[in-house]
Every structure is written in structure tokens, then in C-alpha cells.
Image (cartoon, rainbow, N blue to C red):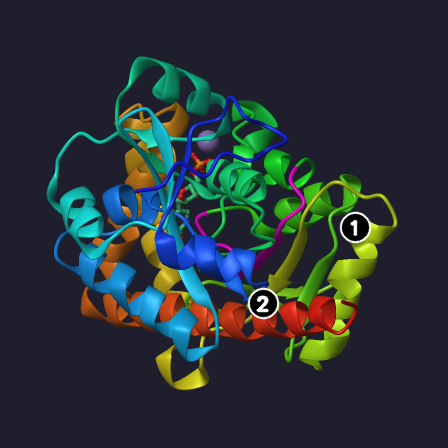
Amino acid sequence: MPDNRNPRRPDVPLVLAPEVADALAEGRPVVALESNVITHGLPYPQNVEAALAVEKAVRAGGSVPATICIADSAIVVGMSDVDIERFGTTAGIPKVSSRDLAVTLATGGAGATTVASSAVCAELAGIPFFASAGIGGVHRGAQTTMDISSDLVQFTRSSVAVVCAGAKKILDLGLTLEFLETHCVPVIAYQSADFPAFYCRSSGFRSPQRIDDEDVLARVIDMHWALGNQGSVLITSPVREADAVDGAEVDAAIADALVAADRDGVRGNAVTKYLMRAVDHATGGRSATANAAVLASTAEVAGRLAAAHARLLAGRR
Ligand code: PSU
Ligand code: MN
């Protein structure tokens, strides 16, 4: 594969898939995707199926998918289907968030990128759009644990438009919104009113902004960066009504999962995976089906919005 180092950062090893490199060179839309959802988000074989379905959905939206990982001391932007299968079936590939990137790259291991580290890599590769159904956020009880996902902190630093279905209710979504407000990150609900909660259509919190037109949204993203802001723009799109999971059922499963996590002494970057698995287990097949549906619908919306943004930029040339 070609080494496609960013001329402004020649020391960063960046390997772009040929299709991604071509699209970027021609100004065609690309949507970056994370790989931690493959290694840590879902069990095999749903993880591989979902990752491939997400890429297909980005294409259906009119953009080129670029799933990101770390392999052989390089940032891979655009994993092949073989890469995805390998990540989905190999045990022990570490979760690599922003602060872990340098260690993983310099020591030569493989790594699965989170939302935070994928945003860093997307920006280095010159990809302004990123999609993930569920972002990290402020955890419940963060007042004492101080557990706040690096995803949120990275949103204050990386100029990437992040399309998501909000975040899972395992988090404190009210505090998550407060954090984003404090750190000047725009939160915009696309064709919806509320901040969504992954497989639930609403978190119970109204989104601070709503925009229904994709071309207007493209202008907003462009303007945010034109104003000199260096952070992300968060855009939400909820799960379809027919695919949503009942909120009360999820709430009960989360309450049990939080007690179990505390009992088992789960700490640090292991907390998110532990809680997600416990809730998935408790809600059985329903959450798995909803999970797949929301992953694909978020990716498709991201594909359409990235295409609108690329049209805006092309209109200027
Ligand atoms: N939320 C999900 N699915 C996921 C994650 C979060 O619904 O797979 C993963 C993402 O990779 C996200 C990471 O970036 O968890 C956040 O982990 P932490 O809370 O440790 O920052
Ligand atoms: Mn954490």
C-alpha cells in the first residue's frame, strides 16, 4: 500500500487505501470509521458483519468508507475486508485511544482506534467526516470517579464532523451535554429534536440545535471552522422508530450492570466495554438487532452529509 504521509506531518506513518487516497485527491467525500467497535464493541461474528454493513451504508449515502486502525507501526486509513476479519477474530488487540497512539505506533503493535484516536487520524489524513453510532461521554458517578471519555476531550481538539446516534444510556447524557456546551462543541440534531441515546430515539434531553437540511448543515460545519474553531461539530441522527429498544428495559439492565461493574472492581478504559456487554446480555437479541440497525443508519446519514459538504467545497473551486 502507498505511504501517504501528510506533507505537513511527514513523520507520521499514514497508509491510505488506494480508493481513499483517490477520493481525497479528487475531492470526493470520505467518511472515517473507528475499529474499536470491531474489537471491543461487539462479539464475533456480529462485529465483522456490522463493520462491513457500516461501510456499505456509507457507500449508500454517497461516500467512500475509511475504517481506521493501527497495524505494523502505521495508521491504516481504509482497512480491507481481510483486515476487518482479522481484527474481528484476533483476541488481545488493544483499545487505542488518543493518548495511546504514540506508544502503539512507536512500539510496532496493532491497535483498535476509539472515536477519539480515529478523529486524530482522520484529521491527519484530511478527512473531515467521521461516523460512530455511539460516542463515549461522561459516566454516571463521574462526580467521584472522574470517568469522562477522551472522546469528549478530543472533540475540543480535532476539526472533524462527528455523526452519531448520541451515546448509550450507560453514560450520564445530561452531564455529557453539559461538558460539550462548556467546551464549545456544537451539538446539532439532524432531522430530529432530541439528543438520541443510541438504540433509544431520545435521551430525554432536547438537542441544543436542530437542522433538517443537509446543505445548511454542510454550511454550518464549514463556517464553524472558518471562524477559527479547532474542534469537532457533533451531529446526531436517531435510530429508526421501528428499530428502537424500549427505554425502561434498557434502564433496568443498566442499573444491574452498574452494580455489577462496581462489585467486580472494573476501572479505567475497561468500564465502557464491561457495561455495554452487560446491557447487551440482559436485553438479549433485541439490543443486538437495534445495534446493527443504528450502526448502519448513522453511517448512511454520515455518507449523505459528507457528500453535501464535498459539494459545497467543490462549488468554490
Ligand atoms: N459506545 C458504543 N460503542 C462503542 C464505544 C462506545 O456504543 O464501541 C467505544 C468507542 O470506541 C468509543 C469508546 O470511542 O468506546 C469510548 O471508550 P471510553 O469510554 O473508555 O473513552
Ligand atoms: Mn473512561
Residue named by callout 2 = 306
- In the rendering, which numbered label is found on residue 141? none
Is 100 on the left-hand or right-hand side of 111? right
Q: Which residues are magenta?
A: 158-170
* Residue at disc 1, secondary structure: helix
Q: Is residue 167 a member of the stretch shown in magenta? A: yes
Q: Residue at x 33, y 46 (%)?
A: 35
Q: Main secondary structure of the magenta part?
A: loop
Q: Residues within 10 Å of mark 2 (few under 14, many from 20)?
A: many
Q: Is residue 211 left or right of residue 40?
A: right
Mark 1: give few (<14), some (14-19) or many (20+) Cα within 10 Å: some
Q: CA distance from mark 2 to mark 1?
A: 15 Å
Query: Split into 4 quadrants, where in the image is the N terminus?
Result: top left
Q: Name the amino acid type tagged 2.
A: Ala
**Which residue of the protein is positioned furthest toward the bottom in this rendering?**
242
Q: Is residue 141 visible?
A: no
Residue 193: x percent and y percent? 67, 75
Q: Is residue 84 visible?
A: yes
Q: Position of residue 26 (x, y in %)?
A: 55, 63
The residue at 45%/52% (across/down) is 21
Residue 175, position in %: x, y? 65, 44
For the C terminus, give its image quadrant.
Answer: bottom right
Between disc 2 and disc 1, whose residue precedes? 1
Going by the numbered disc 1, the residue's amino acid type is: Trp
- Whether the magenta-drawn stretch holds residue 211 is answered as no
**45 up-or-down from 270: above or below:** below
Left or right: 186, with 234 as reference point: right
> Element under label 2?
helix
> Which one is nearer the viewer's eye here, 259 or 169?
169
Label 1 belongs to which residue? 225
In the image, 211: left or right of 155?
A: right
